[in-house]
Amino acid sequence: MTSPDYIAGIKKASVIITDEGGLTCHAAIVSRELNKTCVIGTKIATKVLKDGDLIEVDANKGVVKILKRAV
């Protein structure tokens, strides 16, 4: 989940991906306002994705694909 404390980081990010949330959650609303791609409710993103991973996101299908793992 996100909170107002994360806004500075979200502004720098290309995509927002969360483990939890729904259509009216903070991440979804902020992503809409900042025109950022967002995939919410993945349940496992923070366990699977690591800093530096190169990913591809298809928000229309809700798919996050790891292209290259960080070293």
Image: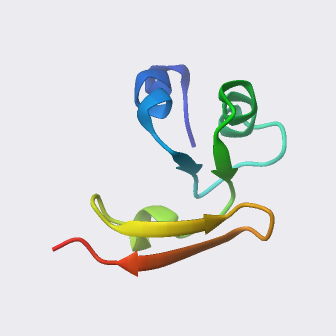
* 10 w.r.t. 69: above or below: above
Q: Quadrant of the N terminus?
A: top right
Residue 70 is left or right of residue 39, and the answer is left
* 35 w.r.t. 42: above or below: above
**Residue 51, percent from left and from top:** 29, 58
Q: How many marks?
A: 0
* 29 w.r.t. 40: above or below: above
Q: Residue furthest left?
A: 71
Q: Quadrant of the C terminus?
A: bottom left
**Residue shown at 79% from the left, 71% from the top:** 61
Residue 40 is left or right of residue 7, and the answer is right
**Residue 18, percent from left and from top:** 58, 53
Way the structure is coloured: rainbow
**Residue shown at 46% from the left, 68% from the top:** 55
**Residue shown at 46% from the left, 40% from the top:** 13
Give residue 49's quadrant in the image.
bottom left
Give residue 29's quadrant in the image.
top right
**Residue 19, percent from left and from top:** 58, 58
Residue 57 is left or right of residue 7, and the answer is right
Residue 50 is left or right of residue 30, and the answer is left
In this view, the residue in front, 28 or 3, is 28
**Residue 3, percent from left and from top:** 55, 28
Q: Residue furthest right?
A: 23
**Residue shown at 73% from the left, 67% from the top:** 62
